[in-house]
Image (cartoon, rainbow, N blue to C red):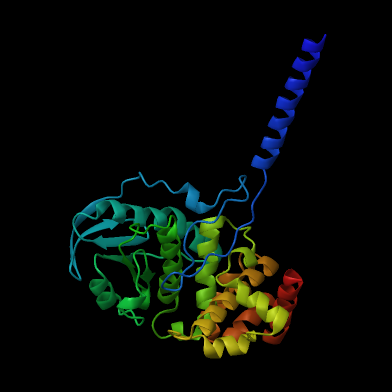
Amino acid sequence: MKIIYLAILTLAIVLLSGCIQQEKGSTVVPNTTNPMTSNDEIKGLPKQTNAAQPPPSSQIDYSHEYPASAANVNGFEMKKTGSGFIVYYHPGDETNANKVLAVLEQGGLNLYKKYLGFEPKDMPVYMAASVDEYVKIADFPGGKENVAVGDGSAPNGKIYLYKPFGETIAGKTGGVIIHEGVHAAAYRFFGQDKIRYLPGFLNEGMAHYLEYIFKAGSGFDPLDLIYHSDLLINGVKTGNPKLLGLEELAQKCDGYISDDILNFLCRGQGTYTVWYIKETYGEEVLGKFLMNLKQTQNWQNALNNATGKTTSQLEQEIQDNLKSRVG
């Protein structure tokens, strides 16, 4: 009888232990904001929190081969061509060129069309093999000391990448490519004469926003992923740093920003603004805003036409929403 009792007790302990382990394994750990390492981008892939809706980054087929051919453009000897992008590269870098095109063709085109309302066509992408080459061809204002492997920039409607997919942080390059693709696509959409009407904080906000969707999916938590969201939280709780209004963001957030705190605020508040507008007014609101801005050349009027709210009303809504999330 004692032996039977011990056997039953042992079995119960084993089953209980299995249940505990299963429950631990199903616990969702919230994401944390990644620190900036270089060139103004959040690095790495966030933890996936919704298995039913995998992020676009997890659906890229890097094995798909895009056609390669010889080229002689800006010192680049080879190119790979997709429906919306042309990647120029040096011999020996074909694998990474193929991966860059996979991200843009399979991920970027869908995101840009869905959220921005248009698709790029024949957009050039240049893959630099050295820091010197990257700084020279990209005309990068930050200097060589601010360039790291996997970085990118997009002046004048062209995308420049430095050793893409050579980084040690998983997922860095994919996000950078999507991010810079937004800048290049916006430049192409507005043209050289009208791109200045798109405020820098909204330009960066859209680029970060689509980068996060690519990495984490459309349902990401803004304070979980937004770049240096700790500044937004501190701004609400303590007033330090002082958060900027939309008009201030438009005035202070254009061009290369050397002051780190201002740079972080411009990008963080810009992304939160874009996130809030899209979440509140629908998926097509960014496309409506961009199309209207191209016509009116006035960002305040364009926002009003797209949302039905004045700049001051939107600013108050965004501040109230941020305060409610911070608690």
Q: Residue 65, how many percent across, how many down?
A: 31, 46
**What residue is at 33 percent from the left and 58 percent from the top?**
166
Q: Is residue 127 above or below residue 16?
A: below
The residue located at (73%, 73%) in the rendering is: 321
Q: Residue 282: image x %, image y %?
A: 66, 65
- Is residue 64 placed above or below 260 in the rendered structure? above
Residue located farthest toward the front when viewing the structure as drawn: 2
Which residue is depicted at the point 30% across and 77% down?
Answer: 144
* Outermost residue, right side: 1
Q: Considering depth in this image, is 181 or 265 the residue closer to the camera?
A: 265
Give the vertical position of 182 relative to 142 (above or below).
Answer: above
Residue 237 is situated, as x and y percent measured from the top left of the image, at 72, 79
Q: Residue furthest top?
A: 1
Left or right side of 183 for 262: right
Question: Looking at the picture, how far across and down is residue 130, in whole percent?
Answer: 24, 68
Q: Quadrant of the C terminus?
A: bottom right
The answer to which quarter of the image holds residue 157 is bottom left
- Residue 217's place in the image compared with 259, above or below, is above
Quick check: can you spot residue 274?
Answer: yes
For the residue pair 23 and 71, the one nearer the viewer reads as 23
Residue 314 visible to an observer of this rendering: no
Residue at 24 percent of width and 59 percent of height: 79
